[in-house]
């Protein structure tokens, strides 16, 4: 029989003819048609359940899209079981238990079909069917938009799911469709979902947005490949993988996600290439459980809108970042729990408000050839069992470069820390770590700061231009075990010819070891180091001296005349008040908390130590020891941790003095979400609740301290007075040098004193000027030059060995 055209008029009364002609119903026309026939459907609404079982063409009239409505009262409106062509139809379904358009067999072509329905699924493909679906739309607010199930497949090109009561596109039961340039939005479930073993989904150039679940959800051993796709504006996570799921994202964009941008669990595997993740409310990558793994290459994770780490790795999971960028986030990379691991290669972590890399609870992180910039903390290895390696990395513009605490033991090799505001490398609380061929330049604090007798190893390290000193090793106190402490080999500093680890100081009340000791140790009676250890809590012991003896040491300090008067006036008030109480009289209330203002190196720490000893001798404090802290010791990285740290520091100072150096750092001008204010609030409450247990002294630059006192209304009222430490003049600096020379059995040759006065007058007094520290460093430099000169003498005389000449002065920078 020859191919013909079948025309159908829904309510017509014309006579029935076989094949070519007009039929009273679509079902009759389909029954009469043979393979290759074309059925052109006249406009109208057809309340029929159609089944296409032959390779025919079923279409609406040209030029009238949407004019043919297939809308039965129940059941499946249109079922396709052959390689037919269906185009320009409008399909409507009402059966919540059945799909609106069902493709069961063959390789049909569906073009420009619009499905508006309230069915179980808008379009369902199953079994051996492999349709090609072009420019079709699905609007199904009651069920799934497109379902491909039970081994089904096919290609969907330029299609759109405009609404779905459940998932936008659902793949299960071993199905494997491909989506090209499709859009899925306004779904009440996930945008794209694939589940079940052998189920697979491929999407190219697609967009998923405005969905009330996850943008993409792959579970139960399913796999998916997304290329050049956009996932954004979801209510739940952007991408979710669970239970052995496998997903590849290439050249994709995931953004504007209120929860996790990508969340993986239960042995799932994700590969990302050239993909960007931005504007996420929780984690950019959240990776959990043993066997779960992410491999990211040339990806960018940035612009967090929440307070969570950009990359979170826990419970034994693994993340690999290769040539990636993570920036503008609260924290960049958190690795937690034994078995968890992060490998980061040739990547940039920058603009990090808190910690760039945090490793805890036995986890491991390895960074090779990475760059960390503009972070509060570059890398923090937090506790026992936590470790890994930083190899050939640079850390620039951090508050602290690397922190190692509580038994953590990383290896840091060939790394450079530039311009940290505080320490370059900071080790405390039993932290360990090996630092090999590392460098610190331009630190606002120490280069390497090792506390508590930590068994840290430093080999072939170097420091340059560190404001407090290149190396600081605070001992573990009188109870420290023998042999405990850092191992230092072949380390150098631009401040001295060599480096040696200082022994425990003879005074038990505080550990205030200064800069790199160079050729000389600390000078008793003239302790001018100002910004000293980040934490330096000594073993408290009862004072051995009377208040008069301690005041005598205070009077022996060079300069500080106004400071001495203030301290003596306070001491007199406290002493007379004590005697009035003993006589049964009322004593004036004296607020003992103080504010010290002034430049670095003016003796603030030294006076705080003596003040505590005086109060202990008068019976005001039980112990009088000094606990020195700064921002890094008080401010945590997460909500609640700051209060805990502040309470711990306060408790260590119980019975003595809590000295907060650079206290203004707790209230930065651009505070925003900074946790420094929490430290201040906690401190104010503790000072009120335990007013007689601890004396608090806050110290820093004058202008900055004024701002600090204005931040919290309760702060200023807690401090009785402000004591200003003026800069030393040239004559006072000369006296310090003379005092040090006498202590170490040197003398100034004729003309040397005059040369020193000229030197101290001419030396730049910028922000890095260290006052008393500068005098000490000048003296050490003179001793080094003297040694170089006298070493050439065959038989030097006593004068040769003791006289320092003007020519021994260092050159002005």
Image (tube, rainbow, N blue to C red):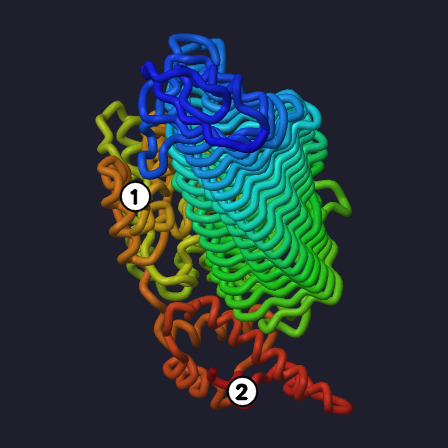
Q: Residue at x 61, y 40 (%)?
A: 225
Observer-nearest residue: 401 or 286?
A: 286
- Residue 5, visible in the rendered structure: yes
- In the image: residue 247, left or right of residue 772: right
- In the image: residue 164, left or right of residue 57: left
Observer-nearest residue: 317 or 68?
A: 68
Q: Residue at x 51, y 76 (%)?
A: 778
Which residue is the site of mark 2?
A: 749
Q: Residue at x 72, y 53 (%)?
A: 434
Residue 590 in the image: above or below residue 568: above
Mark 2 closeness class: few <14, some 14–19, many ≥20 residues within 10 Å: few
- How many numbered discs, if any? 2
Mark 1 closeness class: few <14, some 14–19, many ≥20 residues within 10 Å: few
Tell which circle, 1 or 2, labels the residue nearer the N-terminal end.
1
Residue 666 in picture, x, y percent from top left: 37, 45
Which residue is the site of mark 1?
A: 572
Residue 67 in picture, x, y percent from top left: 32, 28
Is disc 2 placed on a helix, strand or loop?
Answer: loop
Residue 545 in picture, x, y percent from top left: 49, 44
Residue 111 in the image: above or below residue 79: below
Residue 741 in picture, x, y percent from top left: 55, 74
Is disc 1 placed on a helix, strand or loop?
Answer: helix
Q: Quadrant of the N terminus?
A: top right
- In the image: residue 801, left or right of residue 739: right
- Residue 547, visible in the rendered structure: no
């Amino acid at each position: 029989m020859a191919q013909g055209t079948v025309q159908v008029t829904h309510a017509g009364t014309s006579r029935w003819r076989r094949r070519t002609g007009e039929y009273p119903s679509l079902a009759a026309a389909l029954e009469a048609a043979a393979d290759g026939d074309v059925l052109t459907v006249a406009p109208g609404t057809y309340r029929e359940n159609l089944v296409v079982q032959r390779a025919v063409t079923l279409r609406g009239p040209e030029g009238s899209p949407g004019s043919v409505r297939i809308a039965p009262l129940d059941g499946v409106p249109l079922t396709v079981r052959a390689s037919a062509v269906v185009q320009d139809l409008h399909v409507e379904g009402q059966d919540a238990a059945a799909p609106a358009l069902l493709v069961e067999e063959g390789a049909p072509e569906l073009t420009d079909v619009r499905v508006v329905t309230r069915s179980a699924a808008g379009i369902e493909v199953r079994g051996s069917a492999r349709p090609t679906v072009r420019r079709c739309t699905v609007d199904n607010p009651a069920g799934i938009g497109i379902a491909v199930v039970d081994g089904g497949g096919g290609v969907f090109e330029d299609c759109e799911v405009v609404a779905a009561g459940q998932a936008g596109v659902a793949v299960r039961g071993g199905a494997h469709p491909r989506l090209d340039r499709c859009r899925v939005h306004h779904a009440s479930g996930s945008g794209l979902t694939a589940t079940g073993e052998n189920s697979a989904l491929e999407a190219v150039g697609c967009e998923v947005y405005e969905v009330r679940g996850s943008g993409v959800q792959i579970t139960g051993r399913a796999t998916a490949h997304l290329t050049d796709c956009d996932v954004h504006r979801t209510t739940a996570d952007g991408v979710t993988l669970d239970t052995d799921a496998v997903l590849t994202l290439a050249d994709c964009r995931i953004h504007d996600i209120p929860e996790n941008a990508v969340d993986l669990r239960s042995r799932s595997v994700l590969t990302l290439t050239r993909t960007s993740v931005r504007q996420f409310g929780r984690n950019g990558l959240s990776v959990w459980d043993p066997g779960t793994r992410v491999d990211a290459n040339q990806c960018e994770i940035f612009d967090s809108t929440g307070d969570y780490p950009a990359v979170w790795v826990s419970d034994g999971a693994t993340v690999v970042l290769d040539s990636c960028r993570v920036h503008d986030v609260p924290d960049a990379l958190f690795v937690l729990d034994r078995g968890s691991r992060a490998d980061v290669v040739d990547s940039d972590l920058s603009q990090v408000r808190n910690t760039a890399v945090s490793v805890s609870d036995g986890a491991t992180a390895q960074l090779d050839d990475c760059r960390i910039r503009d972070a509060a903390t570059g890398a923090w290895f937090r506790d026992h069992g936590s470790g890994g390696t930083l190899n050939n990395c640079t850390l620039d513009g951090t508050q602290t470069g690397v922190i190692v605490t509580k038994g953590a033991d990383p290896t840091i090799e060939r790394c450079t820390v530039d311009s940290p505001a505080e320490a370059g490398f900071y080790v405390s609380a039993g932290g360990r770590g090996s630092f090999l061929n590392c460098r610190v330049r331009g630190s606002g604090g120490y280069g390497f700061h090792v506390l508590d007798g930590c068994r840290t190893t430093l080999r072939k390290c170097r420091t340059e231009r560190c404001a407090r000193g290149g190396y600081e090793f605070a001992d573990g106190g009188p109870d420290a075990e023998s042999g405990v402490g850092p191992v230092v080999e072949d380390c150098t500093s631009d401040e001295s010819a060599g480096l040696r680890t200082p022994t425990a100081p003879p005074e038990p009340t505080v550990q205030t070891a200064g800069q790199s000791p160079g050729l000389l140790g600390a000078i008793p009676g003239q302790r001018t180091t100002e910004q000293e250890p980040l934490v330096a809590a000594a073993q408290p012991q009862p004072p051995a001296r009377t208040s008069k003896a301690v005041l005598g040491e205070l009077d022996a300090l060079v300069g500080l005349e106004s400071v001495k008067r203030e301290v003596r006036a306070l001491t007199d008030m406290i002493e007379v008040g004590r005697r009035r109480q003993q006589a049964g009289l009322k004593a004036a209330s004296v607020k003992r908390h103080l504010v010290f203002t002034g430049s670095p190196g003016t003796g603030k720490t030294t006076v705080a130590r003596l003040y505590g000893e005086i109060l202990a001798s008068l019976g005001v404090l039980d112990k009088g020891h000094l606990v020195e802290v700064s921002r890094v010791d008080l401010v945590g990285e997460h909500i609640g941790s700051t209060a805990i740290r502040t309470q711990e520091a306060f408790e260590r100072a119980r019975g003595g003095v809590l000295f907060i150096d650079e206290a203004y750092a707790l209230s930065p001008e651009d505070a925003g979400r900074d946790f420094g204010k929490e430290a201040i609030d906690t401190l104010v409450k503790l000072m009120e609740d335990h007013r007689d247990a601890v004396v608090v002294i806050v110290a820093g630059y004058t202008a900055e301290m004024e701002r600090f006192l204005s931040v919290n209304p309760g702060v200023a009222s807690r401090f009785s007075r402000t004591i200003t430490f003026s800069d030393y003049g040239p004559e006072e600096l000369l006296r310090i040098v003379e005092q040090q020379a006498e202590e170490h059995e040197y003398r100034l040759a004729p003309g040397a004193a005059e040369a020193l006065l000229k030197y101290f007058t001419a030396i730049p007094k910028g922000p890095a000027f260290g006052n008393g520290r500068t005098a000490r460093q000048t003296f050490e430099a003179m001793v080094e030059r003297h040694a170089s000169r006298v070493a050439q003498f065959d038989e030097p005389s006593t004068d040769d060995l003791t006289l320092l000449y003007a020519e021994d002065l260092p050159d002005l920078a």
